[in-house]
Structure formats: structure tokens, C-alpha cells
Amino acid sequence: MSAEIATSSLDALPARAPSGPGLRKRQWLLAALLPLLGLALWTADRIAVRHYLSAGQARAEAALRLTANGLEADLARYEVVPQLLAEMDLVRRLVSQPDDTELRQATSEWLATENASLRAADIYLIRPDGETIAASNHLDGPNSFVGRNFSYRPYFTEAMQGGAGRFYGIGTASGIRGYFFSAPVFDFAGRIAGVIAVKVGLDRIEQSWRGDDFRTFVTDPEGRVFLSSEPRWLYASFEAPTPQRVDRTLATRRYADAPLPDLPVERRADHGSLVLRITTDGEARDYIAAAQQMPRAGWTVHVLLDSAAMRAEARLAVFTVMLLLGAGALGALILLQRRARAAERIALQQQANAELERRVQERTAELALLNRQLGQEVAERRATEAELRAAQDSLVQVGKLAALGQMSASLSHEINQPLAAARNYADSAAILIERGDHTEARENIQAILALVDRMAAIGKHLRNAARQPEDPLEPVDLAALLPETRTIVATRLSGSGAVLELDLPPGLPPLKANPTRLQQVLVNLISNAADAVEGAADRRITLSAQAEGDWVILRVRDRGPGVPPLIADRIFDPFFTTKGMGAGLGLGLSISANIVRDFGGTIACRDAAPGAEFCVRLPIARAA
């Protein structure tokens, strides 16, 4: 207790502000750290940018090697095809007899078949004067190569000189880009009598380059882009164009009539990496560049990687480093401040010792007084607990009497109706005996005995109200149960002027219930309906039933005032009634609800406007 008092008293003391020399020392330390943090930020930025640009350069070079090897391998598949086709007898016969029409048609059809197998763009055969005499696209109408002259193409002149030709360009007939391989065709006398050319489409290569982080393109010997993953760069001059380069391009008609723009490119070294700034449609971007020559084709393959992402990664790394450094510096400042605060707190604690001793003495006196008051409260609470136990014993006794009264009221309520029916049968039997109609009188006496058995069953049900009923459930035919039910409620119906209407479909399946207790539910619902329609203009009561799946739905509807929504939730509570004093105990619906629940069913009430409708849902009895 003394420790708690000391702690609370210490917390109540005012804290002193930091001393002047300590504050000036921390300010000086902070001023010295700021230049160091700036230098660290600049150094970290340079190191991070160099690191990430070097990593980007390595990625670009790796992608360049894969791209160049893949392009070389793809073109190498078709390099020997012209030489193989030039050695075929059909081709050699056609160059020996170029004016044979039938031979031209047969050769064109054969070339079309071979072109489909090779998956090339076109294969065609050219005479020494440059005229095409057979082609795989001979059926393409205006786009057919047959009859066209290609003597201006370099691959034709190279093949006519006895070597293999290579050339890239746009087809003047088809307007489609392709790479051309050619080889000389010798006649049977060993002379060069023609050239066979194979055109390979390259659009599929461009498609494979798109969709990744790299910009890939290929330039021809004149520095012009002819393959590119960026469509806006196609046919643009990547190198500074000169009149000689432009003349060579136009002489070979490499790009047909396509426009030949210039691509603005600025080259610079950035942290040891080659960076290109390319402006396209007014937008400038910086790329890390890597290039590789393809000597056999005379091409240069370029791979570019946008440096913006790497610079962002470098900035993120610098920010992370600075965040860590700032956290360290902040931790050091916090540590220094805590040490200063701890020294000040020790001084304050020494000054407060005397004050704490005085307060401890005062609190000790107060606690002694509180202990005496607490003893008095304990004595008073013990007396209150004794009175509470006595009241609880009285409440238990009252509960027992209430339960006994409820059972007596239930027994009186449920036996009244069979007693009234038995009285009617007895009166009728007396009249029948006076008339000498002993047969009818005997039937009335048997009915009275049945009612007596019913009252015994009701008494047994009420005795078992506090535990689960022991009577087994059995199949009950509802139609067979209704005549006796009508007899029981006949007096109540006639007294209120009500008319009971039955609406039961033929072939209604039996219910899983107890006949006596089910009849008790029906009698209660019909009697309540008779009370509701008494004095009403429409005094019809409708009892209907229908099968729905594994259930039978019983409905009892009257045309009375209905059930207000405010009392709909309480209508099945024991001793709740809307009738006047002495007109009912309010137990009929409560007993009916318990019986329906014992059968495994449900009961509900709704406002039917006009009147009320009680819906009883009971399971169908299935054969074992």
C-alpha cells in the first residue's frame, strides 16, 4: 500500500523542463547530423543508380543474346531450302524449257505444295532476264508473282553470279515484309538458267517480341529499322541518314513505297551504362541499350530496357536506406533524451521523499477509518443476505402454488367441453328411454363412455405436462376423427350460431399424431373460432387440410375481428386471453401449442382480414 501511495504521489509532482545546456547540446548535435545525412543521401543515390543501371544493362545483354540466337536460328531453317529446291528435276526442266505452259503450271502447283509444308511466305522461280515463270502464289490473282520482273533485287543478281543471295525488304507485289533467300538453278548442261527464291515472313517474330519489358528492333546495313516490337519505330532511321544510304535503299526498293522517317535519338553515358533517349510522338524516354551484329545477314540487333523502372527502384532503395538511418538517428536522440529525463526524475524523487513520508502517514490514518467503515458494511450485507434467503424460500412456495393452480385451471378448461357433450348425450338418452328407443339410448351411453375415456386421457396428459409424453404416436386418419369432433363442439357452435365448413381433399394421407390429443387441438381451435364469430355478420368457420411434401397443413379460419398484431406474439402464452372476465382461462391455445410440438409440428396464427387463421403443420405418417 505504501508503494502505491508513493507512486501516485510521485506521478502527481510537476515535471521540470529540460535544462538550458542539455537543450543546446542536442540542438548542436542535430545541426551536425544534417550535413552528414545529406552527404549520405547523395552517395547512396549514386551507388543505387549505378547498381540498378548495371543490373539493367546485364538484363538487356542477356535478352540480346537470346534474341539474336533465336533470330539466327529461325532464318537458318530456310537458308539451304533454295539450294535443295534448285536441284529438283522439275525445276531444272522448267528452266531448260521456260516456254512450256503445262510445265509452268505443274511447277507452280508443286511449289505451292512445298510452300505449305515449309510454312514460308512464297517460293518462286525467275528466268535470267528477271521474269517470274512459276510461283507458289500463282492463284492469288493480282498479287501473283508470275509474270513480274525482279531483276532489280540484290538477291537475284547475287544468285545469277553463282552464289547464294540474301535480302530483306517489302514485297513490291504483296506489300508484305519478308526475308529472301535465293540460289542459282542450273540446267542439264550445267549453265545458270534461272534463280529460285524463298520469301520468309517475319511478322510472327515481331509478335513474339511484344508483351515484355524490352523494346527489340533490328536495323539493316543502312541503319534503318525493319523489325521492331514498337510499331511506331518501323522503317525509321536509327542512324543519322546520309544521301548515300538513302540512294542505296531507294535503288534496291527495299521498302517499296513505305515512308522512311527519322528517329530522334540522343546517346549518352550514365553511370557507366549506355543510355539512349528516344523521342516518339513528342514523348521522350530513356533506355539502356545493348546491340549485337549479325555478320552473315548484315544486321544489327538492338535491345532496349526502359530505365524509368530501375531509377524508381534506386529511389526506393535510397529511401529505405535513409529511412533506416533516420530511424537510427531518431533512436539515438530518444535514448539521449530518456537518459536526461531519468536523471531529472531521480532528482525529483529525492526532493519528494519527505513529502511522501508525510502523505503516507496521512493515508495510514485514512485507511484505518475506512477499515472500520468496511466492517460495518459487511455486517449490514450479511443481514441483507439472510433476508434475501427468506424471500427466496417464500418465492419457491408461491411458485409451487402457482404451478398447482395452473394445472387445476388446465384440467377444468379441458374437461368442461367433454362434460358438456356427456350432459347432452345423457339428456338425449333419458328422452330415448322414455320413448322406448333402447338402441339409440345405448349408442348415447357408449358415446358418454367414450367421453369419459377422453376426460381420463386429458387428465393423463395434464399429469404428464412436466415431462415428455409417454403415449406413442401413430397414424391418424383426420377424416375419421372429424364426426366425433363435430359432436363435441356442436353445443358451442349452436350457442354462437356458427357454421362449421369442412374442406378435406380425398386421399389425404394419415398424420403422425395421437388421436385423443389431436382431437383436443381441433376442439380448442374450433371453440375459439366460435367465440370469435359470435355476433358477427359472417359466422362461417372453415376447417381445411392439404398435403405439402412430407407434411399436412391444417387451417382453421373464422370471419371474426381477427388478431391484432400487438398480441399475435403472446396469443399462445398460458393464461393470456382476449375474452372478458369469467369467459375463459387463456389455456386452450397454450395446451394446443404444446401438443403440436410433441407431435413434431408447428402452429401459427395470422390475420386473415377478415378474421384470423390458425395454421397447424403436422408430419405425415410413413409406413415402417
Image (cartoon, grey):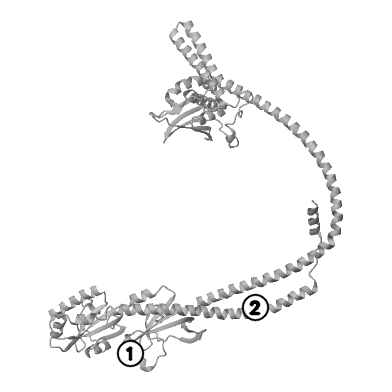
Label 1 SS: helix
Asked if labels 2 and 1 touch by Cβ distance under 8 angstroms, the answer is no
Residue 335 drawn above or below residue 186: above
Residue 188 drawn above or below residue 335: below
Relative side of 548 to 52, left or right: left
Residue 84 drawn above or below residue 366: below
Q: What residue is shown at x 44% (from left), y 26% (from top)?
A: 474
The quarter in which the C terminus is drawn is: top left
Tell me residue 107's x, y (percent). 16, 78
Q: Residues within 10 Å of mark 1 (few under 14, many from 20)?
A: few
Residue 44 makes an appearance in the image = yes
**Residue 271: mark:** none
Q: Looking at this view, is 158 or 602 the one in front?
A: 158
Residue 371, by quadrant, is top right
Q: What residue is shown at x 23% (from left), y 73% (from top)?
A: 117
* Cα–Cα gap, marks 1 and 2: 60 Å
Tell me residue 188's x, y (percent). 13, 86
Residue position marked by numbered label 2 in the rendering: 37
Residue position marked by numbered label 1 in the rendering: 250
Residue type of the residue flagged with mark 1:
Leu
Q: Looking at this view, is 360 or 575 the one in front?
A: 360
Residue type of the residue flagged with mark 2:
Leu
Residue 134 makes an appearance in the image = no
Tell me residue 118's x, y (percent). 25, 75
Label 2 SS: helix
Relative side of 535 to 395, left or right: left
Q: Earlier in the sequence, mark 1 or mark 2?
A: 2
Q: Looking at this view, is 234 or 26 the one in front?
A: 26
